[in-house]
């Protein structure tokens, strides 16, 4: 049975300031107080899952247990058709220890090379965990293609090389509200809030 969010504090299980800012904007109407795992100095668990869902659940449960609060985690990534779905769940790891996404974006473009199929999609799985171990998950997906060279300075991660279907701007060229209306994370958040307000 679906549980509803209760309380006025939610821990976002991330140390990524870009992701945190997006969640704060999208969840502000539903949650009074939002803090990150980074703000609380919670450790980052090793992402050992084989899927986006497994990693999201792993992170959400770890943050909920460590903080004794409800925690929300996402696992998201860019899946490139010509690269057989890579970087996928390894999207953050392709940026290396220094989180240098400029190198990761160049690697994608170099690896795709002359391939005519530059289609790609972003996936986001959100996991909301309670301290007792209960978890709810939802998924968002947006399709598009790889653009080169990178364009725009908004957003984060791979946003400068991803152009969603039916649009001419990359995510990094869009204003926040326009991006959230289209993005995998925006879709997942809308599913989550609808799910948790039902019943």
Image (tube, rainbow, N blue to C red):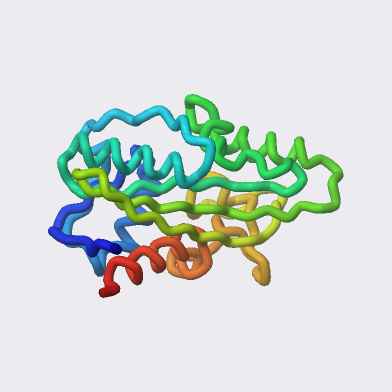
Task: Depth check: give the residue in front, 130 or 149.
Answer: 130
Please identify the quadrant where the N terminus is shown: bottom left
Q: Is residue 185 left or right of residue 23?
A: right
Residue name at image x 49 percent, y 53 percent: 124
Vertical side of 199 occupied by 40: above or below: above
Residue name at image x 50 percent, y 60 percent: 140
| Residue most extreme to the front | 1
The image quarter containing residue 170 is: bottom right
Q: Is residue 123 left or right of residue 54?
A: right
Q: Position of residue 114 (x, y in %)?
A: 86, 44
Task: Depth check: give the residue in front, 92 or 61.
Answer: 61
Total marks drawn? 0
| Residue most extreme to the left | 7
Q: Position of residue 10 (x, y in %)?
A: 21, 52
Q: Position of residue 57 (x, y in %)?
A: 38, 43
Residue name at image x 29 percent, y 47 percent: 12
Q: Is residue 146 left or right of residue 170?
A: right
Task: Depth check: give the residue in front, 87 or 66.
Answer: 66
Residue name at image x 31 percent, y 50 percent: 135
Vertical side of 107 occupied by 23: above or below: below
Q: Position of residue 196 (x, y in %)?
A: 29, 66
| Residue most extreme to the bottom | 199
Q: Is residue 135 left or right of residue 157?
A: left
| Residue most extreme to the top | 97
Please identify the quadrant where the C terminus is shown: bottom left
């Amino acid at each position: 049975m679906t549980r509803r969010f209760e309380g006025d504090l939610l821990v976002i299980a991330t140390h990524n300031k870009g992701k945190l800012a997006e969640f704060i904007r999208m969840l502000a109407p539903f949650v009074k107080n939002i803090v990150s795992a980074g703000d609380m100095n919670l450790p980052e668990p090793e992402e050992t899952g084989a899927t986006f869902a497994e990693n999201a659940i792993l992170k959400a449960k770890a943050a909920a247990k460590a903080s004794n609060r409800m925690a929300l985690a996402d696992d998201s990534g860019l899946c490139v058709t010509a690269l057989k779905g890579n970087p996928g769940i390894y999207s953050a790891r392709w940026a290396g220890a220094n989180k240098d996404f400029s190198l990761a974006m160049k690697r994608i473009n170099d690896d795709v090379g002359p391939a005519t199929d530059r289609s790609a999609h972003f996936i986001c799985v959100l996991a909301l965990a309670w301290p007792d171990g209960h978890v709810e998950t939802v998924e968002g997906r947006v399709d598009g293609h790889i653009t080169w060279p990178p364009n725009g300075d908004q957003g984060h991660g791979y946003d400068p090389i991803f152009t969603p279907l039916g649009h001419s701007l990359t995510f990094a060229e869009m204003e926040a509200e326009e991006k959230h209306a289209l993005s995998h994370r925006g879709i997942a958040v809308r599913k989550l809030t609808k799910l948790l307000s039902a019943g």
